[in-house]
Amino acid sequence: MTNKPPIEPTIHELFDLTGRVALVTGAAGHLGASMARALAEAGAGVVISSRDASRAEQAAKSLSGPAEHHAVVIDHMDETSIETGFDRAVELADKIDILVNNGHEPLNEDWSTVTAEQFTRQLANATGYFLLARKLHDHAVERTAPAAVVMIGSMYGVVGSYPDAYKSIGPASPVSYHALKGGILHMTRHLAVYWAKDRVRVNCLSPGPFPSPHASPELVKRLNAKSPMHRIGLPHELKGALLLLAGDAGSYITGQNLLVDGGWTAW
């Protein structure tokens, strides 16, 4: 009697999220909305979280796909909100298989003006990411099911800023933001190592220059000039990378940082 080799899944099967549920924080924003659409289009049920209940509900209603979508309130800067919001998401959707830690409380103060209190507050974004990731880990272990965490980092967690891009336009890229994103990247590696035995994968998706539609035209012009592709990223260009890290297509990927930056960090 010979052992038959395992049946190789098709590309469609590897990227199919039918039957899974994803929680996406900050999913009513510029990049979060596109990532939520990617998960829904791949067949997942999506739970959208925001600090604003009406924004979360509106974003959830806008999603298509075969599954049911939900909205919850989570302020990832508040531990109590994380606890109640995650539990509410599980109550609504029965389970959570995928967590996308995308929510972010911004800070515009640069190195010359940021206070100690503001700097510490910015780093608390990472605390929220960790607490939510741990909630998913414990939920997955309790269910004896695999799970995936995708931390949203930044090219600025890998390289320094480009001072000339911000000169005379506004504050320099915040030093606390760089410290935050670098910390999120290393937290990804740490958790991936500890949680691999529990079948909980942890990866980081780091966008490059993806300024919002409200960004200064002059800033966009300067970012274009710096990029090897001579253009900024479009939100939908994160969709494929997210699905790779969230689903079975990335089943042997953990502890990694996937940069989607138009070649910025290749200089």
Image (cartoon, grey):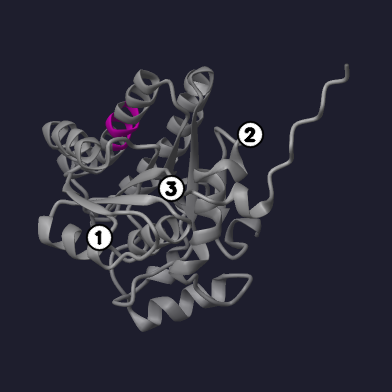
Dot placed on the residue nearer the N-terminal end, 3 or 1: 1
Find out whether the residues at labels 1 and 2 contact each other: C-beta distance under 8 Å. no
| For discs 3 and 2, the disc positioned in front in the rendered view | 2
Disc 1 crowd, CA 10 A, few/some/many (<14, 14-19, 20+): many
Tell me which residue sits at (33%, 77%) in the image: 213
Residue 262, position as x, y percentages in the image: 59, 65
The amino acid on which the numbered mark 2 sits, given as a three-letter code, is: Tyr
Q: Which residue is mark 2?
A: 252
Dot placed on the residue nearer the N-terminal end, 3 or 2: 3
Residue 263 is marked as none
Instruction: Indicate whether residue 160 is drawn in magenta.
Output: no
Residue 208, position as x, y percentages in the image: 49, 60
From this view, report whether residue 52 is shown above or below residue 3.
Answer: below
Q: CA distance from mark 3 to mark 2?
A: 20 Å
Q: CA distance from mark 1 to mark 2?
A: 30 Å
Q: Magenta segment range? A: 129-134
The amino acid on which the numbered mark 1 sits, given as a three-letter code, is: Ala
Left or right, residue 9 beside residue 190: right
Q: Which residue is mark 1?
A: 60
Describe the element under mark 1 as helix, strand or loop: helix
Disc 3 crowd, CA 10 A, few/some/many (<14, 14-19, 20+): many
Find residue 107 and report its image quarter: bottom left
Residue 248, position as x, y percentages in the image: 58, 41
Q: Which residue is mark 3?
A: 153
